[in-house]
Amino acid sequence: MVETQQCRKIFISLLVFCIFYSINVLTVEAKTHYHVWDVKYTYKFPDCYKKLAITINGESPGPTIYAQQGDTVVVRLTNTMLTENVAVHWHGIRQYGTPWHDGTDGVTQCAIMPGETLDYKFVVDRAGTYLYHAHYGMQISAGLYGFIIVKLPDGVSEPFAYDHDHTILLKDWYHGSTYEEAVGLSSIPFKWVGEPQSLLINGRGRFNCSAADTASGVCNATNSDCSPYSLTVVPGKTYRLRIASLTSLSALSFEIEGHNMTVVEADGSFVEPFVTKNLYINSGETYSVIVKADQDSKRNYWITTNVVGRKPSTPTGLGIFNYYPNYHYKYPTTEPTTGPFWNDTASKLAQSRAIKAHHDYVTAPPPTSDRVIVLLNTQNLVNGIYRWSLNNISLSLPLTPFLVSLKHNFTDTFDQNPPPDTYDVENYDIYSIAENKNATSSNPIYSIDFNTTVDIILQNANTMSNATSETHPWHLHGHDFWILGYGDGKFNITKDAKSYNLANPIMRNTVPLYPYGWTALRFRADNPGVWLFHCHIESHFYMGMGVVFEAGIDKVGTLPKSIMGCGKTKHMINP
Ligand SMILES: *[C@@H]1O[C@H](CO)[C@@H](O)[C@H](O)[C@H]1NC(C)=O
Ligand SMILES: *[C@@H]1O[C@H](CO)[C@@H](O)[C@H](O)[C@H]1NC(C)=O
Ligand SMILES: *[C@@H]1O[C@H](CO)[C@@H](O)[C@H](O)[C@H]1NC(C)=O
Ligand SMILES: *[C@@H]1O[C@H](CO)[C@@H](O)[C@H](O)[C@H]1NC(C)=O
Ligand SMILES: *[C@@H]1O[C@H](CO)[C@@H](O)[C@H](O)[C@H]1NC(C)=O
Ligand SMILES: *[C@@H]1O[C@H](CO)[C@@H](O)[C@H](O)[C@H]1NC(C)=O
Ligand SMILES: *[C@@H]1O[C@H](CO)[C@@H](O)[C@H](O)[C@H]1NC(C)=O
Ligand SMILES: *[C@@H]1O[C@H](CO)[C@@H](O)[C@H](O)[C@H]1NC(C)=O
Ligand SMILES: *[C@@H]1O[C@H](CO)[C@@H](O)[C@H](O)[C@H]1NC(C)=O
Ligand SMILES: *[C@@H]1O[C@H](CO)[C@@H](O)[C@H](O)[C@H]1NC(C)=O
Ligand SMILES: [Cu+2]
């Protein structure tokens, strides 16, 4: 009875919603795509091991959003989790004109509370391969993630040819709860999340169930959730594979046994094509590669993904590259490929450097910048808690979202002292154990003059453990940046700025910072709003590894009330 009433209620609201938006559609040329999402916890067996996953309409990964350049996407998201907020970020979508729908808890909105609904609405202004994922707590780890695929306008084609287009989403998977992980990270003594139990390819992996777990039903090797991902190919055909990673921690290498791939797209930009045996991919990055089904078609081949950058203790993630008409679950008789050495930073750096803008699609960066911000990445202790900091400041999100505070001139909701543009470059030894253990946990912002050009130098250093420096994939909201260069050791502006690639740098939204190295970026602050720039390793961001940029706040339109309701915005919504 209760169920029937609920169904009717949902159906009626859906109908009203569709009619309402259909009227809107008639007045514009571009299409509008409506999605109705129910976000809730569901028992899943992605690697055969039972886990409560956050699902969208029952699925993890969630449904792929398809659209064409210039279209509008509307997602009506209802939070059906009983005790947990949620916010969803549209990763790679710049949100021109709709900075309030970037989906970043504490930065651009108040999180959606249990039982509440929010309509996200934004234009996908550029073709390419993008993502969506939770941006609240550590919910990516719990499985709230998926693809956004934006096609080119009719009659326009890519600078490469293919017969078929497929998506491959990579994920590391933990059996523990995200609550336990989050509490461990902020406890004394510190408890690290550790290496993941499995690697998933399109949400599917395989954990080696123990007899006891099988007997108790916690692990079930015959559950259909964990049947392997199998990509069926027709001999002689050419495939575009859109490969993306939304790992919580792991950097990965991806390969298809016996097949090379040609890299052609990165984060929505066309790449000057290059051939490789394996693709390195960090959390938050997307690529398109071209693969030809041109090998012996009497057998199948392994699709494999491995942890790189950290000493792995996670088994290889496996899928099947299936030549038609072989049985799609026929395992190759060969040993799965093991990928490159996990510690081969030189080959990762070489591949990063090989990624340049396609010669017909170069967008030249401004030749100089108006401001240089150098961000020293360190691990610190704040009141005895392990944190990550940038120039001694570890980001703690405010109760009131920055966007609302800035638009409404609140000065008591976040730290008003501007954060430093650099660190003590002369005296800081990036190779020794971090000494400035006592960093500050705070939430100041970098205010950028609208439409000026900013260089960001990410400077890596030793962590609080001896002889250790980690890889951090940095992601910028609201913009693409030009990648001007990567280097080893300490960045020296007089020397290293001379080696910048200003001729054909790729534009991306995510870039790795390698151990003991630096990465230089340039972007134009031409998107009015407040934008997060952060390490895409979920636990690192949770531990404060991010900064916030503001530009052109006076050009931001009236904020919708739907993003309010928390902190000082409570009084701003009418009951
Ligand atoms: C799975 O675990 C069992 C022990 O529980 C071990 O004997 C076996 O070799 C493992 N299989 C694989 C493929 O790792
Ligand atoms: C394992 O999963 C299969 C398929 O879903 C199901 O039929 C079977 O009952 C499950 N086994 C256990 C022990 O739960
Ligand atoms: C892959 O590329 C390498 C280097 O270009 C080449 O030596 C190798 O033969 C290629 N392999 C296949 C299967 O095409
Ligand atoms: C990588 O680690 C292996 C051992 O796992 C070691 O033999 C090798 O020297 C290391 N390579 C580099 C480049 O550090
Ligand atoms: C905030 O301050 C700016 C500049 O002083 C002013 O133009 C604007 O009207 C103020 N906004 C509000 C909501 O008070
Ligand atoms: C960071 O803290 C250290 C140690 O307290 C200090 O020497 C250094 O000047 C600080 N750096 C910045 C950018 O504030
Ligand atoms: C840490 O720094 C804060 C100010 O940032 C200061 O109040 C506190 O006393 C320092 N603690 C230690 C142990 O140095
Ligand atoms: C930003 O500056 C560039 C170069 O001066 C100019 O072409 C562009 O129109 C400006 N954009 C905005 C939004 O003001
Ligand atoms: C730190 O590691 C280096 C290289 O492994 C080693 O030579 C040195 O003795 C270590 N120092 C400490 C304090 O453990
Ligand atoms: C930076 O490079 C310049 C030019 O190579 C050199 O003169 C200077 O000493 C370097 N600075 C540092 C701090 O290494
Ligand atoms: Cu990081």
Image (tube, helix red, strand yellow):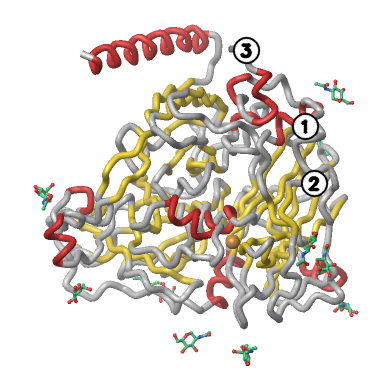
In the displayed structure, would residue 271 be above or below residue 446?
Answer: below
Residue 143 placement, left or right of 518: left
In the displayed structure, would residue 156 be above or below residue 445?
Answer: above
Can you tell me whether the CB of the residue at mark 1 lies under 8 Å from the nearest atom of ligand 5? no
Which element carries disc 2, helix, strand or loop?
strand
In the displayed structure, would residue 96 be above or below residue 316?
Answer: above
Q: How much space separates mark 3 and mark 2, taking CA atoms? A: 32 Å
Which element carries disc 1, helix, strand or loop?
helix
Residue 318 placement, left or right of 86: left
Which element carries disc 3, helix, strand or loop?
loop
Query: Picture coordinates of residue 328 (x, y %)?
Result: 16, 54
Q: Which residue bears the numbered disc 2?
A: 446
Can you tell me whether the CB of the residue at mark 2 lies under 8 Å from the nearest atom of ligand 6? no
> The residue under label 3 is which amino acid type?
Asn
Counting residues from the start of the chain, the first of labels 2 and 1 encountered is: 1
The residue positioned 77% from the left and 78% from the top of the image is: 429
Q: Quadrant of the C terminus?
A: top right
Q: How much space separates mark 1 and mark 3, taking CA atoms? A: 21 Å
Q: Which residue bears the numbered disc 1?
A: 406
Tell me the quarter of the picture where residue 524 sits: top right
Q: Which residue bears the numbered disc 3?
A: 574
The residue positioned 74% from the left and 26% from the top of the image is: 556
Query: Picture coordinates of residue 64 (x, y %)?
Result: 39, 37
Tell me the quarter of the picture where residue 500 sits: bottom right
> The residue under label 1 is which amino acid type?
Leu
Foreground pick, 239 / 496: 496
The residue positioned 68% from the left and 40% from the top of the image is: 398
Q: Are marks 3 and 2 in contact (CB under 8 Å)?
A: no
> The residue under label 2 is which amino acid type?
Tyr
Foreground pick, 155 / 77: 77
Foreground pick, 280 / 378: 378
